[in-house]
Image (tube, helix red, strand yellow):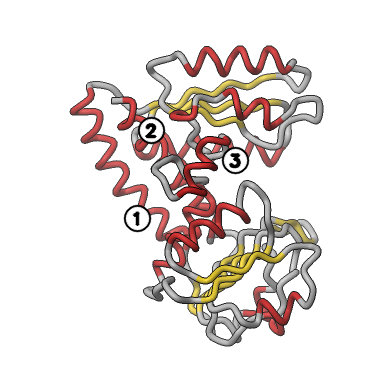
Amino acid sequence: MAKIIDGKQIAAELRAELKEKVAAFAAEAGCLPGLAVILVGEDPASQVYVRNKIRGCEEVGIQSFCYRLPESVSEAQLKSLICELNDDPHVDGILVQLPLPRHLDEQRILACIAVEKDVDGFHVQNAGNLMLGQEGLTPCTPAGCIRLIESTGISIEGKHAVVIGRSNIVGKPMALLLLQKNATVTVCHSRTRDLGGITRQADILVSAVGKADFVTADMVKPGAVVIDVGMNRKEGKLCGDVAFDEVFPVAGFLTPVPGGVGPMTIAMLLSNTLKAARSHG
């Protein structure tokens, strides 16, 4: 039977630590760290995510600035706002909520964010820093996943870690962070042959494919740490990539959806905002 990795609890502990650190920073710097969040359009899921991020800021004492733009906004208008925020001394972090409407080029928009204010860690320079093992702002979801794995007390070093998914937001940075922790890493994707044969070798299995119940019990090594990054809907209910009830008796540790990776993503975003503020100071 798996032990549940309680992302809510671990994130709450991290936020409590951050609240103290933010207060200490504010006392020393004479100002609060500031996070600007840009939301384009009316996507319901994005609105929920933005609301949760702003609530997280309030909880730890970070100042938040929310910019809601119509879906019809032009690329030039959005870039102009980002350039203003790049120059604003009250703003330490800038986040553009994804996905953007189709007429906006995500890569070009993200490239406009000043690298030192890129609290999502998506800028090509931060991606390069991660690749080279240098200091920078790390993508929030993979960083949160590392914290969850470490919370089990199991050492990552020397373990075989398998990541399902190769997105720039989760899969690739997740693999790099695991490599930094001295795991032996395999990245699987839609063209991988004998996927189950590979995942059954994993001491640590991270799934980020966005398909409900994709990871079944026969794909999991008994006793493995299973991290479910998926956020899917099935019959109106939120669920992950992992068939939870089926995998629960096999895994050693397992994150639930909701209440696993999600809260950690926001906690790491707040942590990145404080880190960015300190670097500006």
Q: How far across and down, in percent of the image, does residue 60 sit?
A: 35, 39
Say what amino acid the circle numbered 3 marks: Tyr
- Measure how far apart labels 1 and 2 are at the Cα level: 21 Å
The dot on residue 172 is: none
Number of other residues with Cα within 10 Å of mark 3, as a class: few under 14, some 14 to 19, many 20 or more? some
Whichever of labels 3 and 2 marks the residue nearer the N terminus, that label is 3
Mark 2 sits on what residue? 276
Q: Name the element at disc 2.
A: helix
Q: Which residue is drawn at 42% across and 64% down?
A: 181
- Measure how far apart labels 3 and 2 are at the Cα level: 21 Å
Q: How far across and down, in percent of the image, does residue 128 sit?
A: 53, 42
Whichever of labels 1 and 3 marks the residue nearer the N terminus, that label is 1
Number of other residues with Cα within 10 Å of mark 1, as a class: few under 14, some 14 to 19, many 20 or more? few
Say which quarter of the image contains residue 162. Answer: bottom right
Q: Who is closer to the viewer here, 243 or 117?
A: 117
- Measure how far apart labels 1 and 3 are at the Cα level: 20 Å
**Above or below for 127 versus 40:** below
Q: Are marks 1 and 2 in contact (CB under 8 Å)?
A: no
Say what amino acid the circle numbered 2 marks: Ala
Say what amino acid the circle numbered 1 marks: Glu
Mark 1 sits on what residue? 13
Disc 3 vs disc 2: which is toward the camera?
Answer: 2
Mark 3 sits on what residue? 49
**Above or below for 52 versus 82:** below
Q: Name the element at disc 3.
A: helix
Give the left or right position of residue 278, taking residue 49 as reference: left
Q: How far across and down, in percent of the image, does residue 245 sit?
A: 66, 78
Q: How far across and down, in percent of the image, does residue 213 sit?
A: 74, 69
Give the left or right position of residue 6, taking residue 51 as reference: left
